[in-house]
Amino acid sequence: MKDDEQWRDKLTDEEFQVCRGKGTERAFTGEYWDCKEPGVYHCRCCGEPLFDSGTKYDSGSGWPSFYQPASADVIDEERDTAHGMIRTEVMCAKCGCHLGHVFEDGPQPTGLRYCINSLSIKLEPEAGS
C-alpha cells in the first residue's frame, strides 16, 4: 500500500483530502452527483471497479448514490462516530480509499444508500456511449 507522500503525488489536493483524509465534498458540487451516463465507477486511487451505473439513483442528497456495490468484496465498512454522529463509513477494500457512507434508507432491492464522494470515484463510460 502506498504511503501519504505517494498518494499526494497521484491525487489532487481535493482528492487527497477526501480519499486519504476522509473528507467530504459539498453536496451538489461533485462531478457525478447528477451524472446519468452508463458505465462503471472505479476507485479514484487504485482503479478497482466499485459501482455499476445501473445501481445509481437520485437520492436527493447531492452525492452520487448507489443501492449496491459491484460485488460484496470490493467495499469495506467501518463504524464512524466523527462529528457527533454514528454512521457506517465505506472504503475501497483494495486500497482503503474513503468513499463515503452507507445508510439504510435506500430503495429496494437492498434498502441501502451508498452515498459516495465524486472525488473518490472515476466513471469509465460504457463502450459506445
Image (tube, rainbow, N blue to C red):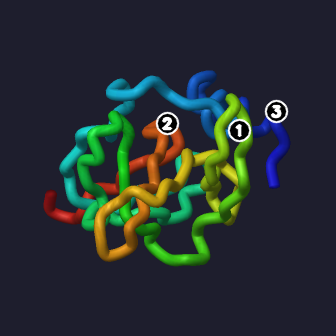
| Residue hosting label 3 | 5
> Which percent across, then down, holds residue 127?
22, 65
| Residue depth check, mark 2 versus mark 3: number of the one nearer the observer | 2
* Mark found first going from the N terminus, 2 or 3: 3
Quadrant where the image shows the N terminus = bottom right
Q: Amino acid at mark 2?
A: Leu
Looking at this view, is 16 or 103 the one in front?
A: 103
> Which percent across, then down, holds residue 46?
62, 55
| Residue hosting label 2 | 119
Give the spatial CA distance, label 1 vs label 3: 11 Å
| Residue hosting label 1 | 20
Looking at this view, is 111 or 116 the one in front?
A: 111
Whether residue 59 is visible? yes
Q: Is residue 1 left or right of residue 107?
A: right
Q: Is residue 42 left or right of residue 97?
A: left
Above or below, comparing residue 129 to residue 33 in the picture: below
Q: Amino acid at mark 3?
A: Glu
Quadrant where the image shows the C terminus = bottom left
Looking at this view, is 61 or 7 the one in front?
A: 61
Above or below, comparing residue 25 to residue 52 in the picture: above
Q: Residue at x 42, y 68 (%)?
A: 68
